Amino acid sequence: MAKVLIIGAGGVGGVVAHKCAQARDVFDDVLLVSRTLSRCEKLQREIAEVQGREIRIGQVDADDVAATTRLLERERPAVVINVALPYQDLPIMDACLAAGVDYLDTANYEPPDVAKFEYKWQWAYRERFRERGIMAVLGSGFDPGVTNVYCAHAQKHLFDSIRHVDILDCNGGSHGKAFATNFNPEINIREITARGRYWERGEWKETDPLSVSAVFDYPGVGERKSFLLYHEELESLALNLRGLERIRFWMTFGEAYLKHLEVLGNVGMTRIDPVLYEGHPVVPIKFLKELLPDPSSLAAGYTGKTSIGCLIEGVKDGKPRKVFIYNICDHAACYREVRAQAVSYTTGVPAVTGAVMMVTGQWPKQPGVWNMEELDPDPFLADVARRGLPWVVEERAVAGS
Ligand code: NDP
């Protein structure tokens, strides 16, 4: 039995706390901390009511490395699940190094003043984590996360070599709001308004934001227009998949969402640099975040499904093969189980599975910093399916065969 410390009490943090509370056979002590204590108090009450279990809560500003280190030294958890924002990744990793505690997150570090996410900052911790004898697992959400593990499964069991991967992410649900984002608005809008990027034959190719689209047929949802984006798992998968020639990421957006985003961009509301307003510096995107619905508030009444997977083409036993490995997740079912919508659920459940892998030794402890596809996909996929995210492998026709 293990103690888990969850940092961040937003949409994803709520799911992680509910699911850790459900995992009575693994976690005998669940501690949820965040910057704003009232959010932890609300989740504590909700978890007592829905899961019938008391979790402990606390307050910490995770940008303060010394404060987080003191918390870790006092509590000595088996693992920290970081579901605060990407800005907190490095300070929390520093605290884990100081206290000697294993670490897991769902999104890679971004500097607040540059809309650019790359693994280089977190990969730079590899040697220090190895020397300290502790393990960090990066990106254990859905994408990144489960999508990396689907690729690892394909590499281990389904293909001799993989040529093409297209990661397809569809939210076919409806929350009834004119404009809202399904996870932290600031992080979400920074990601979507960035230039597109994909990897082909050893080179990164750039596209204008949202300028490349294609229609894909998503199981459980149907055909949807999807836009090419840069997404962080492309960086590690391009390195870790043998024989890979091309990897891209696609996400669906509705017309109304894109129109709002265009207008907000045109008037400067998505800017990440401070502007002076009546003598006070204001970062427009941070102000916009305060006006938009909190992602966790979208859960009640959300209908429809997410459908996310990896379309993988390659060679098996000398013959071309193409498969789609995917999960379908229903917003309303997530709400009934953990009071969350499916985007938070599909991120939070894999974070808990990753932590379970670490504390139960199903991923034997390997000091260092790891991306998901570097670890054994088999126990992870069995656990994540049991915990609420079953997966399907569908054979697809190969063009020309
Ligand atoms: P929210 O904005 O809903 O929640 C973030 C939480 O982190 C809030 O409770 C916030 O506290 C807390 N927080 C922020 N700064 C600090 C700090 N300095 N110290 C302590 N706590 C802090 O975001 P989501 O729950 O939607 O997303 C959480 C993470 O999950 C993000 O990193 C996001 O990028 C990632 N994600 C990953 C996905 C994947 O598939 N891999 C998909 C979706 C999200 P406060 O209430 O005070 O603001």
Image (cartoon, rainbow, N blue to C red):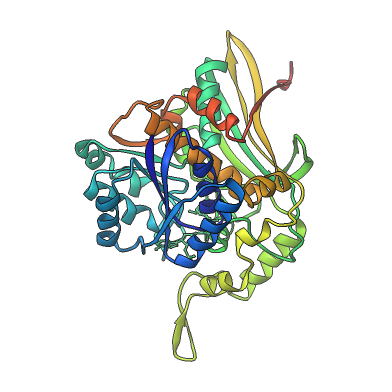
Which of the two residues, 356 or 268, is positioned nearer the viewer here? 356
> Residue 225: x and y, percent?
75, 46
Most extreme residue toward the top is 317
Do we see residue 301 in this rendering? yes
Which residue corresponds to the image point at 58% horizontal and 39% vertical from the top-left? 248
Q: What is the x, y in percent for residue 374?
A: 41, 29
The reply, left or right, for residue 249 in relation to residue 100 is right
71 relative position to 391: left or right: left
In what quadrant of the picture does the C terminus appear?
top right
Task: Please tell me which residue lies in front, 380 or 28.
Answer: 28
Q: What is the quadrant of residue 114 in the picture?
A: bottom left
User: Do we see residue 202 in this rendering?
Assistant: no
Residue 398 falls left or right of residue 352: right
**Quadrant of the frame with the N terminus:** top left
Q: How many marks?
A: 0
Say above or below: 223 vs 43.
above
On the image, the x and y values in percent for residue 122 come to 34, 46
Q: Write down the quadrant of residue 368 in the picture.
A: top left
Q: Compared to 45, does 16 lie above or below?
A: above
Most extreme residue toward the bottom is: 278
On the image, the x and y values in percent for residue 298 come to 67, 59
Residue located at (24% from left, 51% from top): 73
20 relative to 153, above or below: below
Quarter of image, res 321: top right
| Residue at the far left in the pictured view | 131
The reply, left or right, for residue 163 in relation to residue 394 is left
> Residue at left 55%, top 58%?
45
